[in-house]
Image (cartoon, rainbow, N blue to C red):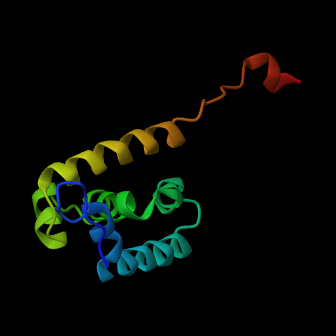
Amino acid sequence: MLLNRADGRPDELALIRSEPISMQWTNELRRNIGLHPGCQLLRELLSLDPSTRTVVYPFLIKGWSSRRIADRLKISLITIQKLLEAGREQLKRKLAAPVRIETARERQE
C-alpha cells in the first residue's frame, strides 16, 4: 500500500521500495560483494537507504541513464535526480577517507 502525500499523489519513495526490482538489485549487489569483497564502493552502495540504492545501483553499476531508471520505476525524473544527488553526496563522504602517506623517516624506523 502506497502512502499518499498531502497533494493526493502517491509517495514516490514508497513506490520505489515496493518495486520487486529494488530487492532484485539488492540481491545482485550482495552477490557482487561476495565476488569482490575488497570493493569498498559495492559495500558502501549496500549501506545506502533502499530508495537511494535502487536508483544509484543501476546508474553506477549497470550504466543506466536517469531517464531509463525513471521509466523503469515509473517515477518522476526529478525524484531520480534528487536521489542520485543524495547518493553521490553520501558515497563521496564515505569513500573520501583521508589517505595517509608514509614519510621516508617512518619507512626507516
Q: Residue at x 52, y 75 (%)?
A: 35
Q: Residue at x 28, y 49 (%)?
A: 84
The N terminus - image quarter: bottom left
The C terminus - image quarter: top right
Rendered location of residue 78, percent (x, y): 15, 49
**Above or below 98: residue 30:** below
In the image: residue 20, left or right of residue 33: left
In the image: residue 106, left or right of residue 76: right
Determine which quarter of the picture holds residue 99.
Answer: top right
**Above or below 99: residue 32:** below
Furthest-top residue in this view: 105
Rendered location of residue 54, percent (x, y): 33, 65
Furthest-right residue in this view: 109
In the image: residue 53, left or right of residue 73: right
Q: Residue at x 32, y 57 (%)?
A: 56
Q: Nearer the viewer, residue 99 or 49?
A: 49
Rendered location of residue 42, percent (x, y): 47, 61
Q: Residue at x 81, y 22 (%)?
A: 106
**Above or below 19: residue 102:** above
Determine which quarter of the picture holds residue 92.
Answer: top left
Q: How many marks?
A: 0
Rendered location of residue 16, percent (x, y): 29, 68
